[in-house]
Image: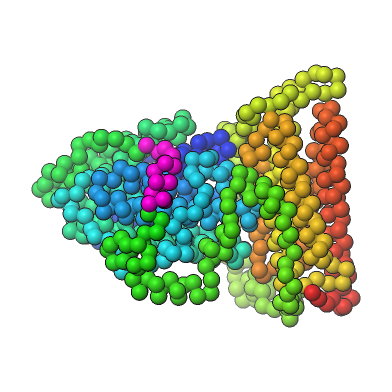
Amino acid sequence: MFTWKDLVREPISKLDDEAFTRVRLIVGHAVEQAAVRFQHAAVRFGAEHRLLLADIRRVEHHQATLLRWLQPADQSPLESSIAVAQAAVEVGAQMARCEPDPYAAQALRLGLLEDFDHLYRLAALMDRLEGRDANAILQSYTDIRPGRPTSAQHRAPEDDLRRWYDRYATAPATKLHARIAGAIAYHARDHYLDVGPTFADPVARQLYAELASVKEQHVTQCESLLDPAETWLERWLLQEAAEVYLYWGCLSSETNPRVLAVWDRFLAYELEHLRIVRELYEKTEMRDASEIVPLSFTEPLEFTGERAFIREVLAAEVELGAAGTEFVPRDAESRATQSYRAQLERDGSPSETVAAGYRWSPGTELADPRIRDASVLPAESDRIMNRARRPTDLALNRTGIYLSPTDGPAVVEGRATPRARPAARALAEVRRQYAGEVGLIGHMPAPASLRVVENPGGEVLRRHKVHLLLDKLGERLAFERTGVRLFDALMAKLEAQGSWDRGPTLEELAQFRADEAHHFALLQDVLINLGADPTAVTPSADLAGVELAGIVQVMTDPRTTLPQALHAHLVAELVDSASWEQLVSLADDFGEAALAHKLREPLAQELRHRDTVTTWLKRHAALVVGGTLKYSA
């Protein structure tokens, strides 16, 4: 039914595809994973059907794989998290709006406002950690503003349990909504648990731990809505029906032709699964399956923005909480919840820390001159951490094979005999094949009113040349914006660890940060004057984010030293200075003398940054070699 190449096909474009294409893929993957989990558990109750369960489960697993692998590689973990939160918000909002049972609808709205706040906190983290705008993922479908504060979402376990629906009296839509919402919550929980440890920044790690905890509460809430008297075959029937219902909605609204074909194919699979389970249910339980699942649904999930509904719920219910199985004002929450929350937040709240004073602005908060140009020099502090140990000190390191006298030779002797065909050639062939078949990472956004750019002779530049210039301007803008955040990280590290003789000072780093902020503002103005949107992510800007991801990791890791962070920063400075040289040269080639002149000042400053960081690192190495290295405030 599948081949490996069929499973691993051309991914969607982060830049070109509609945000709801990504949302549909996330929700589809989540529901397939829920099906696989259920069918594994079902073996314990229906051992006589284990072959049928295994057959269908294998198909469900491969469907989940194909959907997950359609996500693009240039989508960072944090961007993926924002997409997961958007899926929870938008799909949760539509189900809450259409839910016929008032109590179940209230439960869905409770989760909606909490997911909405998670999105806001993740957007603040992306802005302040990486200098990137979450709206590039959201595509203006979903607001970035506070919901029910994440710090107020932590409840005692007994306050996350809900009254279950009556399996005989409840509408099928309620049963399907509860399952889809539970699958999304479970997927988000696992996502936050998987992604959180990949961050070096301690605030990011704490935030993900906090979000995963709340999503565990949401899983509890959704599962508790299900009638425990449902038989396992009844639940299997409803699970397959939920998949049919979901894929019908995906097929009805998809805009990407390649992904549309996937939904069409998967809907056919799920209709067959539903038929098989329906027959099994009627044969085993001697009941008409239409009592559980209707022969047809009235309307599919629409996968459209729910901004108006979300704002309405936000205005009316943001102060709502829960006590036991009831929904109550926050000031009426149980003592158990208040005690649980106080314990968790005894050392502070990561969700409050990451978004303190945060207000989203197009192009990140650095687009606001009041924030971009504000003083970032820290208060006087005596918390200088002169570490007793340094990375160059000798200690236990278990990575070398020749340092393991017993196991090392055994591993070498046990190596598989190499095949005649070099593995590298086989890898290259697969990469070459995919490179010849897939499309681009993305395309340039169409400017609203691109102004004519002319060379000195008056000849209008060809459109693709203008787009090349705009692409490179967008790349530098993205790089400079992240550069501001890199200097924020350097200053925090210097404040904690101190510097050395003729090493960096806070004042120098603050000045370099101000230079980066000025470059960002200048590039914004240049793009606006050319009629382009400075908040749009161009293909080169997207790749700049991927390139910088490792540098951000090094510089925000609390375990790295200031010299190690400066070394990572030097990589950024080398790329930055070379790219500014290219940009100036490009402007000259286009005959844009005024633009080239304007870009030469940032180039000179970037060259000074590069040379200064190089000098600091050379001085540090000389002091280490001379045995005279000392750190001071």
Residue 530: x %, y % from top left: 72, 31
- As drawn, 394 above or below 134: below
Furthest toward the bottom, the residue is 388
Range of the magenta residues?
Answer: 302-316
| Residue 136 at least partly seen | yes
Can you tell which quarter of the image residue 418 is in?
A: bottom right
Q: Relative to residue 260, is residue 404 drawn left or right?
A: right
Q: Nearer the viewer, residue 27 or 382?
A: 382
Residue 407: x %, y % from top left: 60, 73
Residue 591: x %, y % from top left: 84, 27
Q: Relative to residue 111, is residue 437 drawn left or right?
A: right
- Residue at 30% of width from left, 40% of height from top? 244
Q: Nearer the viewer, residue 186 or 323?
A: 323
Q: Nearer the viewer, residue 150 or 255?
A: 150
Residue 515: x %, y % from top left: 79, 51
- As drawn, 174 above or below 458: below
Dominant secondary structure (helix, strand or loop) of the stretch shown in magenta:
helix
Q: Relative to residue 302, is residue 556 drawn left or right?
A: right
